[in-house]
Amino acid sequence: MAPRGGDFIAKKCTTIAIVNQKGGTGKTTTCENLGIGLAMEGKKVLLVDADPQGSLTISMGWQQPDELPTTLSTLMAKAMNDQSIPPGEGVLHHAEGVDLIPANIELAGLEVSLVNCMNREKMLKQVLEGAKHEYDFILLDCTPSLGMLTVNALAAADTTLIPVQAQYLSAKGLEQLLQTVQKVRRQINPKLKIEGILLTMTDSRTNYGQQIDNLIRGAYGSRIKVFDQTIPRSVRAAEISAVGKSIFQHDPKGKVAEAYRSLTKEVMANAERQLKRVAERGR
Ligand code: ADP
Ligand code: MG
């Protein structure tokens, strides 16, 4: 596809990869609620389920992802075969104002076939090329591994948001993840930034919870931004994947909705600062 306007049109889309190779750290929950939070602020938002488990797809109400005719793997297969992707193909529309490219188990097979493909790290980037002109934010819900799919997400992203479950400090895992980000930055995507570490499922009422919070800020705070806003643990948050709604619908007055609302504002402010910086440099 020919570039539309090329580099001289102002860049306005921010692509955020939500990544941690550990499962259960709140990636999918953050992707859904941050995405819908941004849409509530008037932003055009595309969520991309980049996990063969299809958890985001299910959580947003498409309970049978295996029955969907077109998913991310369909689109990535087209990119691999150098076929064009019509705008909007495979995109689902959620009642709360965000769009979704869903995923199902076929994405696992696609990941394997990427190995022999030319430009294999950049297939997701290619799939999203057109969407960048249509949306203000694209959020990528990554699979819990540092394999090809995650590398594709990092290659397509402007920035990464790292949810870390504040239960115990998985320092080794985090180091490994930061090394992967470094490597992608050096070899594939020099502009990749780290948006920040987001502490999830926190429990500030206990001493232990507070200690973990301090520990992570102490260990990483000097190198990487750790979001001031943390996401508290709440049963209401755990329920949303079953109801196909965001926390803003399910428990609008609760502390998790409040937290995601405030995270949304922090992410928007960062993106605006960043886009301004890029625009100034371009002048
Ligand atoms: P990941 O995508 O990193 O595997 P999920 O977002 O699926 O993580 O969250 C893992 C589990 O924890 C899910 O069952 C989810 O419902 C639950 N969960 C997520 N955030 C919260 C929270 N703030 N409070 C309580 N449970 C949560
Ligand atoms: Mg997930």
Image: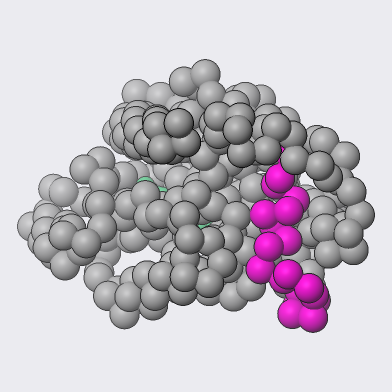
| Segment colored magenta | 112-130
**Which residue is painted at 80% across and 35% down in the image?**
88
Residue 32 to residue 76: above or below: above
State the image coordinates of residue 279 (x, y, percent, origin top left). 45, 32
State the image coordinates of residue 65 (x, y, percent, origin top left). 77, 52
Residue 128 on the magenta segment: yes
**Which residue is painted at 68% across and 38% down in the image?**
6
**Which residue is painted at 72% across and 71% down in the image?**
120
Res 188 seen here: yes
**Would you identify the image quadrant in which residue 216 lies?**
bottom left
Depth check: 48 or 258 in front?
48
Image quadrant containing the N terminus:
top right
Image quadrant containing the C terminus:
top left
State the image coordinates of residue 4 (x, y, percent, origin top left). 74, 34
Q: Magenta segment, principal secondary structure?
A: helix
Please identify the residue farthest to the left as the structure is shown.
207
Q: Is residue 83 left or right of residue 127?
A: right
Depth check: 122 or 246 in front?
122
Q: Is residue 102 left or right of residue 261?
A: right
Residue 39 to residue 144: above or below: above
Report the label total: 0
